[in-house]
Amino acid sequence: MRITMDLELKDIPGQLVKALEPISDAGGNIVSVVHHHEERTSRGTIALQVVFDMEDGLGPLKEQLESRDIKVTRFNEVRLLEHKSVVLVGHIIHSDIRDTIEQIDSTGYAEVVDLAMSMPAISLKSSARIGINATGKIEMKKAVKLLRNIANKKDLLLIEPIETEEIR
Amino acid sequence: MKTLNVAVIGFGSVGRGVLKVLAEHKGIYGDVEFKVVAICDSKGAVMDKKGLDVENVLKQKSNGDLKRVNKTSIEVINECDYDILVEVTPTDATTGEPGLTYITEALKRGKNVVTSNKGPVALKYKALCDLAKKNNALFLFEATVGGAMPMFNLMRMPLAGNKVTNIMGIFNGTCNYILTRMANEELPYDMVLSEAKELGIAEADPTYDVEGIDTALKVVILANAVFGMDVSLKDVDRVGISSISLESLKLASEAGMVIKLIGEVKPNGEERVLKVSPRLVPKNHPLAVQGTLNAAMIQTKLAGDIFVIGKGAGSVETASAILSDMLYIASIK
């Protein structure tokens, strides 16, 4: 999985190596390093953004960095791991929610990671929020398309999210 | 001073708004003067070659003692001497009439046309534009999408030079009112709809709004006018808001989102999008506007995402859009 980590370094020599060493030692493959040495944070430190691929061991790595007096301000492992929530309205249970989930899960590239349901009364339509994770943007598109087809067949209303860009 | 004669067809809410705005300004905007020479509705016309006393006409109309001459709209359009036809008759989504005939006849005479009528623009955009071009007239319709929100004017001038890649937004205030109120007050759809009817926000027959037909017309207009797509109402994938449950809004809210009726147009080939449907919108996203507000996100190549938020309906608000078209005509004619 790909990890993006924001670090803060002290403005003294040798810090960059000190920060990157533990990452490669932990088996991380560094993809990109952005060293903002021209601008200082309000704490007088220098921001560093590192992107790397690593399978596991993120927790110990974070501790290792912090023991070296390097502040980890933010990290995420979801750059490539897409997440989306959708809402379904209709006879969700009667149209076999288990089958709906299994169809997504069996794709191999997407899975249902969260399900919240609300059933006001037995004869009324129920509503569900489904969280889906996928391995990438294209896979997410495919998963949503699959869900669209399922919803169509089962006469459910699928409420999809709008495409949003992160606004900084 | 440049003087342009104006004929107004349609004396409903929008027509009154336009006339009210013009009367307040005595028709004068900088070095441009708009002289209203005719006003028509289904009962007849009031006309004066030298320019009507608009304020007085409005007063007589509200008192119910307006004296009309026995002329039909079409006679006025074909005989009267005017520079701009302001066509503000009600929308008919299936035939576009009577607006379509009015606009066609005016353009045939080489007269500029400004309209708030969605029907003709959604149904016959290309034909009307070709006709306008052939007769060296302008055909403008800012008021058809998003009421007071500048859309076409914004893209024509301030965003000129940008390639617009995608437009999505909230183009129906009635639906947005219903969804906002359901979410904020935790009230079911039927109750909020009745309330909206009482407040005059929804029509007695709300189908046109809540089933997304109005939004779809606007999507068609955007598709044709901005992207040159030549599509019609039947090409739009359309789902309205009538099956949105209170529970679905709550579930969305728990995940930091609201549900909005979103119209979306994206022109590119196989991935073409022409859609009206309820969508999840993050609560902190600029499109998550409240109440009867409309909002649009215009995605562009250079400027990135541009957001416009404003009143999507209302007599004077719609008049604002019509006036901007009239002034554009004045600036280049």
Image: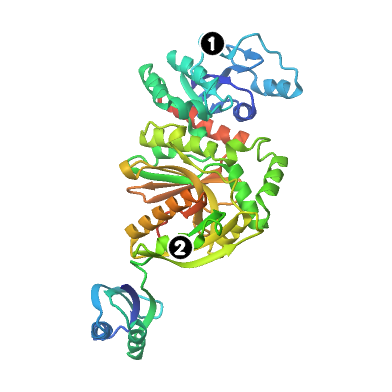
Most foreground residue, B90 or B82: B90
- On the question of residue B291 being in view, the answer is no
Which numbered marker is on residue A101?
2
Dot 1, crowdedness within 10 Å: few (<14), some or many (≥20)? some
**Residue B27 % position (x, y):** 57, 25
Q: Residue A94: which quarter of the image?
A: bottom right
Chain of the residue under the numbered disc 1 shown in the image = B
The residue positioned 54% from the left and 40% from the top of the image is B212
**Residue pictured at 67% horizontal, 15% vertical:** B43
Element assignment for label 2: helix
Task: Give the chain of mark 2.
Answer: A
Q: Residue at position x 62%, y 61% from top?
A: A119
- Tag 1 residue: B80
Measured along the vertical axis of the image, is residue B262 above or below residue B205? below
Does B143 sit left or right of B205 as displayed? Answer: left
- The kind of residue tagged 2 is Ile
Q: Nearer the viewer, mark 2 or mark 1?
A: 2
